Amino acid sequence: MTTTHRVVNGPVSVATGMEPVVRAVLGPDPGVRFEFWDGSGLGPDDAKVTLRLVSPEALRRLVWAPGQLGLGRAYVSGDLEVDGDMFSAIEHLRDAAPDDLRFGLQTIPAIVAAARRLGGIGRPPAPPPEEDRVFGRRHSRARDARAIAHHYDVPEAFYRIVLGPSMTYSCARFSEPDLDLAGAQAAKHELICRKLGLPERPGARLLDVGCGWGSLALHAARRHGARVVGITLSAEQARSARERVRAAGLEDAVEIRRQDYRALAGETFDAISSVGMFEHVGRARMDGYFRTLHRLLAPGGRLLNHAISSVGGSKLTGRTFMGRYVFPDGELIDVGDVVLGMERAGFEVRDVESLREHYARTLRAWVANLEAGWDRAVALAGEGRARIWRLYMVASAVGFEDNGLGIHQVLGVRPDADGRSGMPPTRAGWG
């Protein structure tokens, strides 16, 4: 590792003081260059990625929150800058230090010693204002509503920059190699409708749990004559979805409610879609969730559950960047446990499909959209929030590419009294 020295406030440059920390955390060859607030640097001059600590505050954040949370705070606040391709930066850091950048008890003394030498000790810096801490009983209705508002009650125009005209915030399906993002989202919507049997049942009543800005509801009503109830906890999403329904002239076919799934009662649906919502339910409430949806389905009705998963499951806790800045209380459940949960509720599971590579491609398209519209996105939501979205989407794309994350569509049916499913004999029945 090469070190460029510059004398500041004495004989030791920041790079010299930080070299033991970088070696302890990232190993001898992290593949990136570090530059510090005094002009000194570590690493090859021709590195494709440079991490710039522009202020001692970046080091102080790592002292008080070692690991991804401290790094995330430094990046969101602007104390840490990334020059070069963000995807390469995440990949290099992952490869150099796969276990949360090797932060742990053995490296904290080196960090503290370096911070003391370089003036990085002091009161903990205030977290960026975009950080959220939810309170109350986990997955209570009030706490869930606040967690959803933190992420989704952002100006619609910001999401339109990121998502593009489809306004669909879930994994697309690139069923043809040359499909653009909008076409791939339409292909995903059509696949869901076909898995649910909507083309064969004009006028079927569809419940869309976590309906977002109403894109799937509009597709099902417009293409297949479905009568749709879409529910969301986000006030901003509900308002926008209703406007889109009115603009499409589909008020008689689509109803958008701001409603918790636990408040649904006394209604019957022919099909239920749950797309990108299950991550907010939590393992402790999974069985209750599936029982609720099973109770709402007519005999022969189908449920399509589309959700991110991880092997063994994982919680996005308050000690993580994702838990504090992106999806408070989010939880990824192993797809095997999802299947078992659906079966316990009375569903017959008929199909499981992975879309992992499709989500990596979707996220890369969203990052490209955000970077192309960066100035407008910052004006709408603030630079901190734009940085959050860039970092979490890049890291998620890398996670799907290296199989650290998965995503599955699980299709279940509520058989009728005679045990009949009404399912087509093969997948060719839905394309």
Image: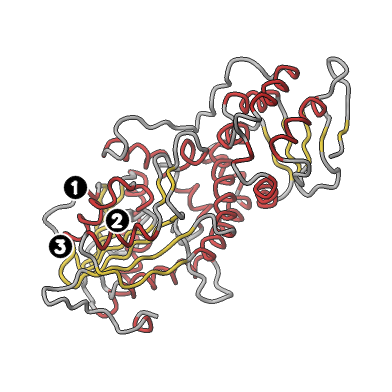
Query: In the visual, does 418 lie left or right of 55?
Result: left
Q: Is residue 63 above or below residue 194?
A: above
How are the residues colored?
A: secondary structure
* Element class at badge 3: loop
Q: Amino acid at mark 1?
A: Ala
Classify the position of the N terminus by image quarter: top right
Question: Dot 1 corresponds to which residue?
Answer: 263
Q: Which numbered marker is on residue 209?
A: 2
Q: Amino acid at mark 2?
A: Val
Classify the position of the C terminus by image quarter: bottom left
Query: In the visual, does 55 lie left or right of 74?
Result: right
| Label 3: how many Cα within 10 Å (few below 14, some 14–19, many 20+) | some
User: Which residue corresponds to the image point at 73% horizontal and 39% vertical from the top-left?
Assistant: 51
Residue 426 percent location from the top left of the image:
34, 83
Q: Quadrant of residue 13?
A: top right
User: Which residue corresponds to the image point at 87% horizontal and 38% vertical from the top-left?
Assistant: 2
Q: Amino acid at mark 3?
A: Thr
Tell me the distance, in whole angstroms, between the alpha carbons under discs 1 and 2: 12 Å
Tell me the distance, in whole angstroms, between the alpha carbons under discs 2 and 3: 14 Å
User: Which residue corresponds to the image point at 60% horizontal and 29% vertical from the top-left?
Assistant: 105
Residues marked 1 and 3 touching at CB (< 8 Å): no
Residue 208 percent location from the top left of the image:
29, 59
User: Which residue corresponds to the image point at 21% horizontal and 71% vertical from the top-left?
Assistant: 204
Earlier-in-chain disc, 2 versus 3: 2
Q: Which numbered marker is on residue 268?
A: 3
Earlier-in-chain disc, 1 versus 3: 1
Q: Is residue 150 above or below residue 367?
A: above
Q: Nearer the viewer, residue 349 or 109?
A: 109
* Element class at badge 1: helix
